[in-house]
Amino acid sequence: MAATPKTRTARTVTRATQTKTGTKSPPKSRANHPTTSAVRARATKASSTRAKAAKTGSTRASATKAATTRAKTTGSSTSAKLATYRSKRDFGRTPEPQGKSPSRWKTRGNPFFVIQKHAASRLHYDFRLEVDGVLKSWAVPKGPSMNPGDKRLAVETEDHPMDYADFEGIIPEGEYGGGTVIVWDAGPYRNLKQRAGEQVPMAESYERGQIEIWLEGKKIRGGFALIHSRMGDSEKNWLLIKMKDTAADPASDPVATRTESVMSGRTIEEVRKKPKKVWSSAR
Ligand code: MN
């Protein structure tokens, strides 16, 4: 408990520094894509111990303070949140969205999530959650598991625009995240996180590093937790864990058995072979 305030402060400072660095010297190479280092990391017993400590360690006061500090540091407008996303990309070279359109997954009354399968230099699944006008994003090397016993590494990446959830196509070789992308799953989600009988706002759960949500996708559904674990001493490392509920199913492995896009029905290989058809229908 005693170490908690120190950890929170360090995290806020790190994030502020990351934002400044990203704006000043935008990395253009896909070599900087977070998954490259993510794949090398391994889930350890130490990390799950740290995750438990994080889960129980935060106080309401420190979380609120961290959220307030971050809002002041980074600005709250969507445009400010997407500065890093834009700085990493040359929109004259990549077909990725610039955040100028609504997403087809947005429905009235519910926020949405999307999971994009991304065959970059290393295959991974980009897990994104709508929070306050942008898509909070994590790269999950192994994708989600329906088994509550699995802890899937989820490496935090920059906020993405809402219409990124509609993107399927090919990011050219040599550009940031170069490779093929499909929309692997998407749908509405519900915020499950409560404290004293009241719902904790998503932005606060994110700042506390303790997100709990119910996903209603076409392939995966049920409660999932995203826990800021810092495993491998990286501030970007979280864990994606299936919660124990009626939707949990260790025998089911949708990542292996459902390889098609929920938007076009196509696999990564099919999009790679005929990208133009997908681009025109998606844009
Ligand atoms: Mn990616």
Image (cartoon, rainbow, N blue to C red):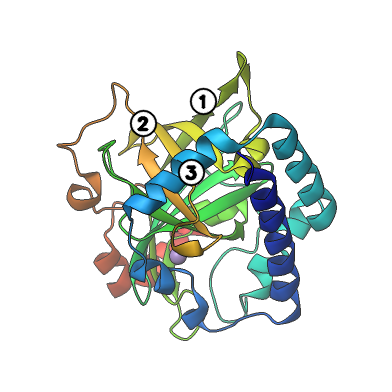
Which quadrant of the figure has residue 251? top left
User: Callout 1 environment at 10 Å: few (<14), some (14 to 19), or many (20+)?
Assistant: some
* Rendered view: 65 above or below 92: above
Question: From the viewer's perspective, is 234 left or right of 250?
Answer: right
* Rendered view: 246 above or below 258: above
Pointer 2 residue = 243
> Residue at 59% across / 83% down in the picture?
28
- Residue 85: x and y, percent? 64, 66
Frontmost residue, 65 versus 169: 65
The reply to whether the residue tagged 2 has its Cβ within 8 angstroms of ligand 1 is no
Question: Quick one: label 1 or label 2, which is nearer the N terminus?
Answer: 1
Question: Quick one: label 2 or label 3, which is nearer the N terminus?
Answer: 3
Pointer 1 residue = 192
Name the quadrant of the N terminus: top right
Question: From the viewer's perspective, is 37 left or right of 123?
Answer: right
Amino acid type, residue under disc 3 in the picture? Ile
User: Callout 2 environment at 10 Å: few (<14), some (14 to 19), or many (20+)?
Assistant: many
Frontmost residue, 281 versus 114: 114
Ligand 1 - quadrant of the structure image: bottom left
Gap in angstroms between the C-alphas marked 1 and 2? 11 Å
Question: Quick one: label 3 or label 1, which is nearer the N terminus?
Answer: 1
- Residue 260: x and y, percent? 26, 53
Residue sitting at the far right? 72
Gap in angstroms between the C-alphas marked 3 and 1? 14 Å
* Rendered view: 195 above or below 132: above
